[in-house]
Image (cartoon, rainbow, N blue to C red):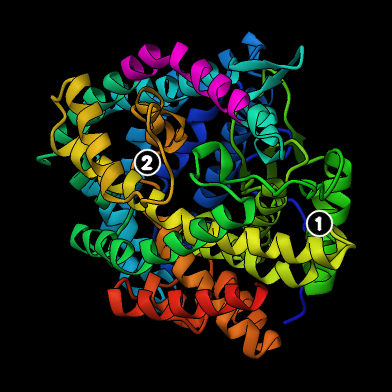
């Protein structure tokens, strides 16, 4: 397969090439055409599917740009209004048509003649959407789309002052790498105190989201939102019991490794007691890693790094840069976090992040770069629906890239000692993220099983779960008020509920691919490309198999992967 990043915007045949989505009245005729068009043969059906796919791509891309622009500047009310208009005026009118078209597809006699090996996962997803659709949920889902964005608006305003200068919380985090321990503590407390100021606003927003989500689930005939969301997310290949098994495996096989990591950190820093403001710090005389300065340099060095892995990967980033599909630097008024937004019609996605010159920004960039490559590799698939891959493989794309790229971080670190420290930092992060994933996931199971809980009960449960997965290595004494609202910094809880265990499942897949890479890097990269090129046309276990991986959440499998990672970490020390 010859790979090219010279991606072309999809040609329009059904929707006019100059069509711009302004209101529902201009859009509805296309949906009416699809709803009313007679289908007399398999060829008619396939053309109908292509036209529907084109329309979906046009609508999806318009919605994505509204969200991108709003997150790039949360202070511009017109951008927020444009996004809200889509959520409240267009999205609710799309849903009845989506249900109508889904039913038309499922009931069409020629659907049986479609190639099942190609259409199986798509048709399975269509049937799931029919089962979930309820007219009563349309206004609720519209309200939820708008409410969820309030998290970014609240968090985007959070700044602190350090040494007389104002910083976003993402920018201020760089001071936690300083070897001046008193500065680290001061900044840590300032960040946490700033979060405390909006504690009640966050609690209130979350409570409202929980109640609305519970209502959506009940309308659809589910006893709780967790069970509804498992179906909506298309978790056909694992269950809540598998998630519980994953939680237990993290306690058994990951926490002991984390104890070792923090014990080593404490010795390096020469401390009697490791506090939370010490975990990112370097010993006296060791300067924090400075992998780049500014967004342009981050982009250029990422291209150099990807070039070493596979020139096609670098070309993907170059194409995005040519299209101005990057917004990399942290600034006031910008929403927090980072994402890669697929643009179904354009093909080349958009990367958004809040870089502040830290090592963690390199990780974010190569992570989102992995997602971007997934978008490029799947862009050639026939239907928009074929490009809707499960998140558990989407995150393999990004997390594997974090590990693959480590061997080529010379672009960021010319000093071999710095490169070693960067790799160590990456492997520590690979391991230490597991308990947080388990905590966030387990918290959500409880939240939606008991949606009528009080704020006090929520806080108590959070602390109970947090302690269950905490190591003894970090001393949190006197910091309970900060810890009680730790969950409020996780935007997934507010914006994409239940989308979090995917990171844990995918991290297992990424470690598996990295094991392959250490043995035969060419074969591992080919397996990676093979799996990502399939988009969502295969089941999750089949996509993992295409990457040469097992889809396995068992403690035994997790133990094997953790032992491999521990050995790799030992090589660096």
Q: Quadrant of residue 420?
A: bottom right
Q: Which residue is mark 2?
A: 98
At 47% from the left and 71% from the top, the residue drawn is 509
Q: Which is more toward the observer, 564 or 479?
A: 479
Look at 72% across and 67% down and name the residue there. Answer: 405
Q: Secondary structure at mark 2?
A: helix
Secondary element under disc 1, as helix, strand or loop, is: helix
Position of the N terminus, as image quadrant, is bottom right
Find the magenta span and give its range: 185-205
Q: Main secondary structure of the magenta part?
A: helix
The residue identified by callout 1 is 302
Can you say whether 547 is above or below 246 in the image?
below
Q: Residue 331, image x and y in percent?
A: 73, 24
Picture coordinates of residue 473, whole percent (x, y): 42, 51
Q: Is residue 304 left or right of residue 484?
A: right
- Name above or below for residue 357 compared with residue 518: above
Q: Residues within 10 Å of mark 1 (few under 14, many from 20)?
A: many
Q: Is residue 188 above or below residue 30?
A: above
Viewport quadrant of the C terminus: bottom right
């Amino acid at each position: 397969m010859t790979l090219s990043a010279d991606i072309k915007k999809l040609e329009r045949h059904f929707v006019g090439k100059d069509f711009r989505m302004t209101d529902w009245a201009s859009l509805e005729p296309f949906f009416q055409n699809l709803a009313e068009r007679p289908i007399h043969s398999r060829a008619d059906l396939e053309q109908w599917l292509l036209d529907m796919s084109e329309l979906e791509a046009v609508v999806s891309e318009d919605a994505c740009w509204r969200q991108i622009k709003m997150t790039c500047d949360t202070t511009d009310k017109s951008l927020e209004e444009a996004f809200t208009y889509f959520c409240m005026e267009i999205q609710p009118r799309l849903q009845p048509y989506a249900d109508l078209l889904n039913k038309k597809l499922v009931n069409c006699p020629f659907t049986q003649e479609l190639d099942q090996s190609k259409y199986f996962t798509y048709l399975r997803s269509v049937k799931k959407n029919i089962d979930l659709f309820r007219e009563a949920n349309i206004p609720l889902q519209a309200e939820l789309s708008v409410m969820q964005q309030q998290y970014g608006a609240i968090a985007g305003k959070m700044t602190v002052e350090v040494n007389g200068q104002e910083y976003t919380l993402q920018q201020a985090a760089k001071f936690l790498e300083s070897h001046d321990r008193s500065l680290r503590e001061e900044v840590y407390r300032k960040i946490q105190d700033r979060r405390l100021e909006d504690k009640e606003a966050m609690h209130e927003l979350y409570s409202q989201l929980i109640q609305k989500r519970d209502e959506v689930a009940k309308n659809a005939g589910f006893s709780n939102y967790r069970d509804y969301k498992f179906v909506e997310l298309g978790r056909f290949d694992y269950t809540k019991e598998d998630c519980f098994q994953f939680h237990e495996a993290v306690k058994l096989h990951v926490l002991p490794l984390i104890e070792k990591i923090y014990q080593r950190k404490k010795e390096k820093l020469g401390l009697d007691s490791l506090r939370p403001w010490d975990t990112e710090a370097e010993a006296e005389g060791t300067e924090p890693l400075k992998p780049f300065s500014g967004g342009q340099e981050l982009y250029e060095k990422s291209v150099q790094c990807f070039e070493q892995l596979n020139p096609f990967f670098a070309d993907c980033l170059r194409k995005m840069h040519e299209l101005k599909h990057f917004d990399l630097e942290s600034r006031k008024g910008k929403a927090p976090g980072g994402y890669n937004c697929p643009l179904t019609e354009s093909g080349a996605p958009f990367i958004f992040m809040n870089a502040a010159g830290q090592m963690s920004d390199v990780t974010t960039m190569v992570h989102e770069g992995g997602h971007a490559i997934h978008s490029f590799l799947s862009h050639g698939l026939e239907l928009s629906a074929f490009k809707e891959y499960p998140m558990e493989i989407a995150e393999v794309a990004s997390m594997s890239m974090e590990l693959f790229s480590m061997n080529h971080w010379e672009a960021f670190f010319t000093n071999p000692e710095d490169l070693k420290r960067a790799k160590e930092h990456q492997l520590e992060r690979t391991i230490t993220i597991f308990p947080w994933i388990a905590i966030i996931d387990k918290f959500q199971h409880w939240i939606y099983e008991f949606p009528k809980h009080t704020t006090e009960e929520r806080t108590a449960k959070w602390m109970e779960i947090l302690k269950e997965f905490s190591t003894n290595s970090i001393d949190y004494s006197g910091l309970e008020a900060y810890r009680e609202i730790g969950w409020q910094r996780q935007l997934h809880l507010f914006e994409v509920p239940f989308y979090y265990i995917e990171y844990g499942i995918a991290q297992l897949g990424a470690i598996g691919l990295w094991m392959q890479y250490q043995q035969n890097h060419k074969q591992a990269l080919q397996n990676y490309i093979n799996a990502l090129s399939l988009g969502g046309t295969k089941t999750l276990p089949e996509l993992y198999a295409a990457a040469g991986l097992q889809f396995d959440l068992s403690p035994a499998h997790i133990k094997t992967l953790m032992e491999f990672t521990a050995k790799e970490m030992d090589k660096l020390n």
